Structure formats: C-alpha cells, structure tokens
Image (cartoon, grey):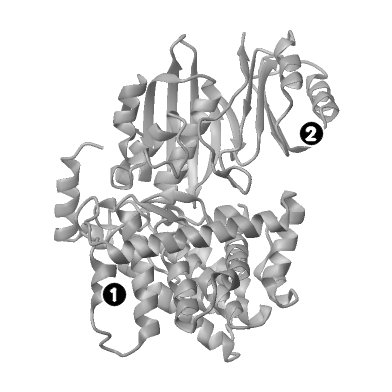
C-alpha cells in the first residue's frame, strides 16, 4: 500500500528520502535506478518545454497550439517573470501533448504541464540545477501515490479535480521541498492545493485534451506555486490532508457522468463546443 | 502505482488513460494471443466510446496490438502501420455494464485461427486493470510479469504450480484463481516479481493438465525497461 499523507507529513525532512526508501523496499528496485529514471523524466519534460515554446503548430483540431509560444514571445506586461515562465512552460508541455507529441504523464497526460511548469519554472527562475529537482520529483510521485489510495486519478472517474488537483498537489509539495520546506510544510502545500481544486469538472470540448486543458495547466501550475508560498510561510490546511482527499473522492463520486470526461456537459455542450464535436465526427479515427 | 508511473510514463499524447493506457491494453492483448494478430474486433465502452476519437484511443489500441509501447513515435500512424502489418481492425460502441468508464473489450484473432477475448479498463495515469480473459473474471495490471494458466480444476494443481515457481527461484506477488464450476475449466493468474525461466515455462507447457499457458511481460514503466518495452515476448502453448 502507498503511504498516507499523514505518514508523509510525519516523515523526517526531506520527505522525498522517506518516499524513495519506502517505495524501493516495496518494489525491490535500487534507489539509484529510480533516481536515474527520474533524471530521464526531467530531461523529457525539458524536451517537451523546449519544443512547445518554439512551436506554434496547431493541434489535431486546431483549437490550440500557439498559446505557449504566444505568451513566451509577448512582452511581460505584469513584469512578473516567474508567473510568465510558469504559465508558458505548463502550456508548452500541454500543447506538445495536444499535437500528439512526446510528454511525461504527471500524473496524467492532460495534467502533464502542471508539474514541469511549477517545478522547472521555479528552478529556472531561481537558477537552480536539474539535479536539485530529482528528489522533489520523487516526492511529487509519493504525494500522487498517497492520493491514489482513495481515488482513481482520471477525469473519467473523478472529474478534473482528480487530474489537475492531483498534479497541482504533487507540484506544490515538490516546489515546497525544493525551497527547503519541511515534510509537514510539503504535505500542507499539497493539501491546500487540493482543497482549492475540489469540484472542478472535466468537460473537454469535443472530447479533446485541448480546451480548457491547455490553459488549465497554466492556471494550476501557478496554483501550485501559490500553495507552496503559503506553506513555506507556515500556513497550513485546516482540514487534515487525508480528509481533504476523502472529500475530493466523495465529490468525484457525486459528480454526474456528464461532467466526467464524456463531453456531455459544461464547455463541451456550448454551441461552439458542439460545433467542434460535430466537425470531429466527420473525421476518421 | 509505482513512482515511475506517477511521474510517467513518457508517452505520445494526448491522454494517459485514453492513449497510454489504451496502448497498454493492446499490448496485453497481443501478449495474451501469443502471436501477431491478424484481426481485432474492439468494443469501446462509455468514455472510451464517447471521447475516444478525440484522444487517439483507436490509434493507441491498435498500436498496442502491433506491439508498440506508449512512447513509440509510430503511434499516431498506427492505422497505416496495421495495414502494412496485415492487421484488420473493426470498432464498435458497446455497453459493458457496471465497469470503469474507460473500458474496452478486444476479440483478437491470429493467422492460425487462435483467438482471445479480453476486457480491460484504463483507470488513470496509464494504469490498466485487466478484468476478463476468455470469459474468466480476473484482475491484474500488467505491472508485473504475469503467468496465466488454464487447466481442468482438480485437487493440488495450485500447490504444485506454486512449488515449481518457488523452485525456479521466483517470488509470487499476487495469485488469483477462478473456475467455471467445480471440476470445470479453471484459470490461474499469478503475478511474479520476475519472469519464469524458459526451462520452467517449457516444463509447465509439457504438463498434461495445462490447456493454455501465457507468460506476459510487464507493460508498465520500470527503470530497466523504460515505459513499457516494445513488442512483448510471450511464451505459450495451446492445447
């Protein structure tokens, strides 16, 4: 069984070392092998970011494809380079995804931009190395495992909260650890990120992982960084983290099928959404 | 779900459950068949049926049937690849009842006429759950090397199988057995910490009781294999 968030919270700092130790004891894998695989995944994430920032090629439907590059090349209106970087990186990954490009699911493909956007975005902003991201990435995975104890991590099972909520929670913990937060602070960051994502529905236009998925990754990468900021200042989630997950799972079960990745509700059922769906039905698989 | 499946797999977009998971379902079906498929009838349930086209689910299932892993760059061209490989595919929407919304049922046939019927769900993040094989209710993820063995139910078979696996130096992670009825056909599904040796498989294959045998490789991410290695190797016999 994966750990609970309470166990993670009570683990010695850094929590990632405990996650790695526990998981390798269970899987029989060498810790170094898992770390090496994570290094590979960070390289893959960088590759997706670089391709995504450089390309304005349209996705399968033409609904997205130019957003990351558009933001990246635009003047920094808010004079907030961290914000711009995090948003651009996150969308770069998800636009690569929408083009059937190569990405790292984290934890899913639809939410693949959140963790690289937040973690690699913060690291680049502060001039930190990729090697410093390896253990925070392990912690992100551990937080995902803890969430998956109670909940399938898929939009079809629990709405977007299960996907983007999980990715934001994972990213929040990772950023908190990267910036020296305690195990307790990391898990509270995750919990606050999750608490403020509960109820989010999965209503992709035409059934594609494009709208609102691409911009949603930009928003929730920033959401993760916000959670880390609060946790690093020792703010905490009033509801204990595992209870927040229980609440999310409950809301997921209450969510009607129409709002769980079937494209039968929400944005997917707007006149524009229906037009895209009709156009798509004309195409061959 | 391992740490490497939580941050991973490395995959061709756009959806971990509808693309990477679907690809792995196809990979398991190919491994169960034990030889290259020539015809596949694929039933898509609920979310797979409703939004599959937009997620490349059809392409991914076919890619998996061809033995491509989720990160294989050929995935978007799976239909052309299938044509080149002599695999014909037919899709239809089906209602499989109270199962996960991302579920597919595959009836896959090989050149020699052998056939398997498999139902599997993609439960999120690229993780799958195989729930039916040839009419037997099962539950395995393809995350470990998995031995499947069909035999006529009788006393002591499971004990002998377990003893032989131990003698091969392999540890059992999980074991499930279902049978049609007492004394009827039984299917044993054993998830292992490592694959059995060729010698052990040959020995099982030679057993009079064994009607059908498959040793499935893991289709999930691992540091050694990456993100579900290419064309799965299978060993099997069919009575």
Location of residue B224 (image quadrant):
top right
What is the x, y in percent for residue A144? 57, 63
Q: Name the chain letter of the residue that bears numbered label 1.
A: A
What is the x, y in percent for residue B77? 31, 36
Q: Name the chain letter of the residue that bears numbered label 2.
A: B
Foreground disc of the pair 2, 1: 1
Q: Name the residue under label 1.
A: A72
Q: In this view, does B204 lie above or below A284?
A: above
Please report the residue visible at 43 percent of the width from the left and 20 percent of the height from the top: B37
In the rendered picture of this protein, how many numbered marks are placed on residues? 2
Few, some or many C-alpha atoms within 10 Å of disc 2 (few <14, some 14-19, many ≥20)?
A: some
Q: Residue A31 carries which label?
A: none
**If the image is split into quadrants, where does the C terminus of chain B sit?**
top right
Q: Is residue B13 left or right of residue B217?
A: left
Location of residue A67 (image quadrant):
bottom left
Please report the residue visible at 47 percent of the width from the left and 80 percent of the height from the top: A225
What is the x, y in percent for residue A259? 34, 58
The local secondary structure at tag 1 comes to helix
Few, some or many C-alpha atoms within 10 Å of disc 1 (few <14, some 14-19, many ≥20)?
A: some
Q: Would residue B101 be visible to someone looking at this image?
A: no
Of A209 and B175, which appears nearest the observer?
A209
Real-space Cα distance between discs 2 and 1?
Answer: 53 Å
Q: Would residue A75 be visible to someone looking at this image?
A: yes
Q: Is residue B110 left or right of residue A58?
A: right
Q: Name the residue under label 2.
A: B170
Q: Is residue A156 left or right of residue A248?
A: left
């Amino acid at each position: 069984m994966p750990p609970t968030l309470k166990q993670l919270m009570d683990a010695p700092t850094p929590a990632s070392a405990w996650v790695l130790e526990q998981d390798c004891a269970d899987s029989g894998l060498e810790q170094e092998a898992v770390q090496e695989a994570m290094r590979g995944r960070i390289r893959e994430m960088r590759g997706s970011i670089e391709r995504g920032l450089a390309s304005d090629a349209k996705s399968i439907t033409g609904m997205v494809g130019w957003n990351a590059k558009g933001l990246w090349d635009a003047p920094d209106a808010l004079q907030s380079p961290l914000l711009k970087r995090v948003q651009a990186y996150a969308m770069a990954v998800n636009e690569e995804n929408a083009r059937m490009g190569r990405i790292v699911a984290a934890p899913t493909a639809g939410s693949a931009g959140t963790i690289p956007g937040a973690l690699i975005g913060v690291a680049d902003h502060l001039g930190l190395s990729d090697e410093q991201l390896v253990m925070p990435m392990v912690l992100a995975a551990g937080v995902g495992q803890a969430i998956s104890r109670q909940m399938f991590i898929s939009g079809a099972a629990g709405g977007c909260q299960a996907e983007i909520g999980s990715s934001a929670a994972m990213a929040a913990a990772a950023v908190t650890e990267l910036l020296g937060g305690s195990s307790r602070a990391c898990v509270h960051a995750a919990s606050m990120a999750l608490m403020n994502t509960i109820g989010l529905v999965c209503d992709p236009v035409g059934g594609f992982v494009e709208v609102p998925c691409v911009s949603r990754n930009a928003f929730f990468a920033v959401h993760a960084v916000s959670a880390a900021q609060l946790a690093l200042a020792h703010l905490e989630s009033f509801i204990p983290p595992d209870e927040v997950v229980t609440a999310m799972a409950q809301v997921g079960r209450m969510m009607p099928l129409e709002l769980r990745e079937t494209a039968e509700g929400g944005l997917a059922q707007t006149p524009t959404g229906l037009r895209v769906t009709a156009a798509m039905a004309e195409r061959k698989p | 779900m391992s740490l490497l499946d939580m941050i991973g797999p490395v995959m061709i977009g756009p959806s971990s459950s509808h693309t990477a998971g679907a690809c792995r379902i196809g990979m398991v079906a190919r491994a169960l068949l034990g030889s290259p498929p020539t015809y596949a009838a694929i039933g898509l349930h609920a979310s797979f049926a409703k939004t599959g086209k937009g997620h490349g689910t059809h392409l991914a299932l076919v890619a998996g049937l061809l033995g491509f892993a989720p990160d294989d760059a050929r995935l978007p061209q799976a239909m052309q690849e299938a044509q080149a490989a002599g695999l014909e595919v037919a899709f239809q929407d089906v209602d499989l009842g109270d199962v996960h919304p991302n579920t597919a049922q595959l009836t896959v046939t090989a050149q020699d006429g052998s056939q398997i019927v498999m139902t599997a769900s993609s439960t999120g993040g690229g993780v799958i759950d195989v729930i039916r094989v040839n009419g037997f209710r099962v539950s395995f993820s393809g995350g470990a090397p998995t031995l499947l063995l069909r035999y006529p139910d009788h006393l002591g078979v499971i004990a002998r199988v377990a003893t032989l696996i131990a003698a091969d130096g392999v540890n059992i992670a999980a074991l499930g057995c279902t049978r049609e009825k007492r004394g009827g056909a039984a299917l044993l599904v054993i998830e292992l910490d490592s694959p059995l040796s060729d010698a052990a498989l040959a020995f099982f294959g030679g057993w009079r009781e064994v009607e059908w045998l498959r040793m499935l490789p893991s289709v999930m991410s691992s540091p050694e294999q990456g993100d579900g290695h290419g064309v799965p190797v299978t060993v099997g016999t069919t009575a």
